[in-house]
Image (cartoon, grey):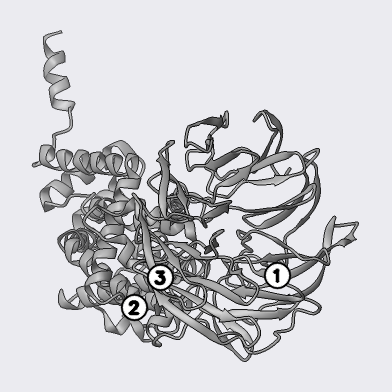
Amino acid sequence: MRKKFVFISIILLAAVFLSGCTGAVAWPGLSASGDVAYLANTNTVYAVDAKSGKQLWKFSGESSGGIFSFGKSPNMYITNPVLTEDGLVIVLDSSSKHIMYALDPNDIDLEKQTPNIKWKFSEVKGLWIAPPLVIGNRLFAPNSDGKVYVLDLADGKSEKQAIEAITVSESAKEEARLWAQPVTDGERLFVTSLDKSVIAIDLKTYDVLWHKDLGGAVPGGAALGADGMLYVGSLAKQLERFDPVTGAHEPVLDTKGWIWGTPVASGDNLYFGDVEGYVYSFNTADGTLNWEAQPDSAITASPLVYGDQILVATESGGVYSFNADGDFDEWYKPADKGKAYTTPVVAGDFVLVAYLESDYYLVALDAESDEKWTFSGK
Amino acid sequence: MKNTGNQTQAQRPELPQGFATESLKTIAVIAILVLAFTNFSAVINFVVNILIFIYTFVGKNFGIAIILLTVLIRLVTWPLNAQQMKGAKAMQDMQNDKDWIAIQKKYAKDREKLAQEQMRVYREKGINPFGSCLPTLIQFPILFALIPSITYAIGSTPLSILKLSNSLYSFQDVASLVPLNSKFLWIDLGLPERTIIFGVGIPILALTVALTTYIQSKLTMPVSSTPGDQSAATARMMSIYMPVMLFLFSVNYASGLSIYFVASNILSIVQYALMGKVNWRNLLPGGQKS
């Protein structure tokens, strides 16, 4: 009897172990303000001093309570933390708890070395994947339930009813997942959705001004070009240009693969990558492709404009530096394994790159791409 | 010196009939298992592709796709399950065999001799002692691959969709599939299921897994007429142990997996019923004692 008990236990444990062989479920979120970097990694958010790489504080949220806690699941922090003008750090628990926390880093619990929670909001039905957008004293938070929630930053109370951003049929509503941070031109809020659509919302009335369908899901955000037009990439392997007022749109560039990351505008140029590993520079002034190049592997991160260079992180873990003509070289390659899906950020004097499946979570690189420190959360 | 060779030949245990065939079967199963687990990602990709193909075919309903995949796995492994049942029944009947009981008593203190005699009885009765084990083992790669496959396929995070796109074969149009509809009834298949009742999250699906597992194990438990039958005692213990294990498993994993467990349990009962091996009396209190 005991042998059979042990045998079946081994089988179940093996099943759990093998299911874990599929690796991580999400890549980390990363943002920075001044000399402080904020890293949302698995079940913890870290604040890291960009000068030294030392941890300033960490936040894990409410305890999951283990396997016997009905109604709870492990915390999961994967979206870029967002900073408000008042110094609050907005972090999102992307687990089924659906909690948004506003942390006050000026009010630290010294014993636990964690910031106190100023408020939290969890009246949503879907996962938090998209970082919210701060506009004045309001927070616009898209959710995987297809709604944009507008919160008062002072207390986290829902300012009005959540915006029903997606006005599609009830059956298709399940597909209306909002995964990207919105952008604004001051009058409108532009939201992208996995249900293959782009939506413009009036910032005063919260009315949906237009709602346009694309040929593919849009996991990344929209970018406003220097020409005042809105640019959106999708899984349909196309870059689309939108008139922000009317929503009239047209494809302006076919790409080799899915466009995942949000394009980045710099002057007249728009930079973005695709999952086939190509990097594109598109001229918004004349609507032509400046250049395209393929460093190595899939690109899900947005490029980072760093001085006169364009830095692009790839799935293989490399960071590539492009010049204005599209010439590139390998700027940084981690000594160890690691995958870079997250957009690099600048914090203080350094470029920070977040890694998945690596011995460290974060690496700081100076202007010469020399490693200054690594952070592993220990 | 001359007699040594003859003595050795006489002492050598006689190989059972069909030993070579059975050995080859065992080696083949081990080879398949080694191949599957050393290329586990290929097995996962295979299962993911079947799951996504069914999902597309049934109008983008993942719940139905998982149930149909379960049916497909049951159909494909039907002969193996039937062989397993046959082997298990034969082993169960063996517990009541006069020869078997006699040698257990006679050679209780000589394990080597007992093993030789057991092999002789197996051979005479035409029973493969691994007959109930090998068909189960060969199904493990698919069962193990189901967990990550369902997690990949439902894709509730950006990375899971990216992994899905890398897993799918070229004939599958991933872009048109994304986003995948992970809703089935009231359940988000990508997350552990909880239904809020009076403010408390109740894992109804995990409880259903436990209940169907319990019923399935009770219904398929062979009736034992021998007091102190060890295999019957094991079966009774497993009918408690398995529901608890699968409940804890279901509480923490994507509910798509729970749908698989429930469907698999129901189909298992159906298969046993079609083969006339369901003991409905076992559901009654004290039923298995009769």
Label 2: state its secondary structure. Answer: helix
| Residue labelled with disc 2 | B288
The type of residue carrying mark 1 is: Val
Label 3: state its secondary structure. Answer: strand
Quarter of the image for residue A60 reads bottom right
Q: Position of residue B46 (x, y in %)?
A: 27, 53
Tell me how far mark 1 sits from mark 3, CA to CA. 27 Å
Q: Earlier in the sequence, mark 1 or mark 3?
A: 1
User: Chain for mark 1?
Assistant: A
Tell me how far mark 3 sits from mark 2, CA to CA. 71 Å
Label 1: state its secondary structure. Answer: strand
Q: Position of residue A115 (x, y in %)?
A: 83, 61
Q: Is residue A228 left or right of residue A233?
A: right
Residue A249 is labelled as 3
User: Chain for mark 2?
Assistant: B
The type of residue carrying mark 3 is: His
Residue B287 is labelled as none
Q: Which-is-in-front pick, marks 3 and 2? A: 3
| Residue labelled with disc 1 | A134
Residue shown at 48% from the left, 38% from the top: A316
The type of residue carrying mark 2 is: Gln
